[in-house]
């Protein structure tokens, strides 16, 4: 299974573009910051990840205000077939339930 659910904020986003087939695409950079339990202790976790939303969700994705904590769900895939870097493909999102950022 390849599913990622993370609370993060958009810190940078692109303008809406379209594939040659007419599918709308939105890209953004997400930032996550939380404390996680590991080996009996607390660990500060911070990261940025490139994200993409395709199709119907893309316009709503770009309407999210910068810096607002949201709960994003989706999957990870290579940026392109020859790349080793990954991109988070967002398939759904909602307002984060609390200010605490949790990585699932």
Image: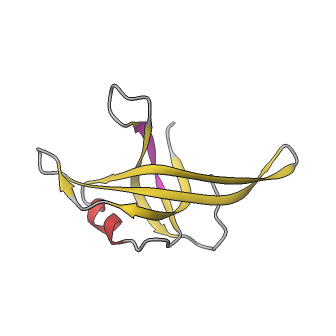
Question: Which residue is at the far right?
Answer: 40
Residue range corresponding to the magenta coloring: 73-77
The residue located at (50%, 44%) in the rendering is 3
The residue located at (11%, 44%) in the rendering is 20
Q: Quadrant of residue 77?
A: top left
Instruction: Report the side of 12 relative to 43 (left or right).
Output: left
Question: Which residue is at the far front?
Answer: 12
Above or below residue 31? Residue 94 is below
Does the magenta segment cover residue 51?
no
Q: Position of residue 43 (x, y in %)?
A: 77, 52
Please, what is the dominant secondary structure of the magenta stretch?
strand
In the foreground, 92 or 68: 68
Q: Position of residue 6 (x, y in %)?
A: 55, 56
Q: Quadrant of residue 78?
A: top left
In the foreground, 39 or 31: 31
What colouring style does the render use?
secondary structure
The residue located at (88%, 47%) in the rendering is 40
Q: Quadrant of residue 86?
A: top left
Q: Position of residue 37 (x, y in %)?
A: 79, 52
Instruction: Report the side of 30 relative to 91 (left or right).
Output: right
Instruction: Report the side of 69 relative to 21 (left or right).
Output: right
The residue located at (35%, 64%) in the rendering is 61
In the foreground, 3 or 15: 15
Above or below residue 76? Residue 60 is below
């Amino acid at each position: 299974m390849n599913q990622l659910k993370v609370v993060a904020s958009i810190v940078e986003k692109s303008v809406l573009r379209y594939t040659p087939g007419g599918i709308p695409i939105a890209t953004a950079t997400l930032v996550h910051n939380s404390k996680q339990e590991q080996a009996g202790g607390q660990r500060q976790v911070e990261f940025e990840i490139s994200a993409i939303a395709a199709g119907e969700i893309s316009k709503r994705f770009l309407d999210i205000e910068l810096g607002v904590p949201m709960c994003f769900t989706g999957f990870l895939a290579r940026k392109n077939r020859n790349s080793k870097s990954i991109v988070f493909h967002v398939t759904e999102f909602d307002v984060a339930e609390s200010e605490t950022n949790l990585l699932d």
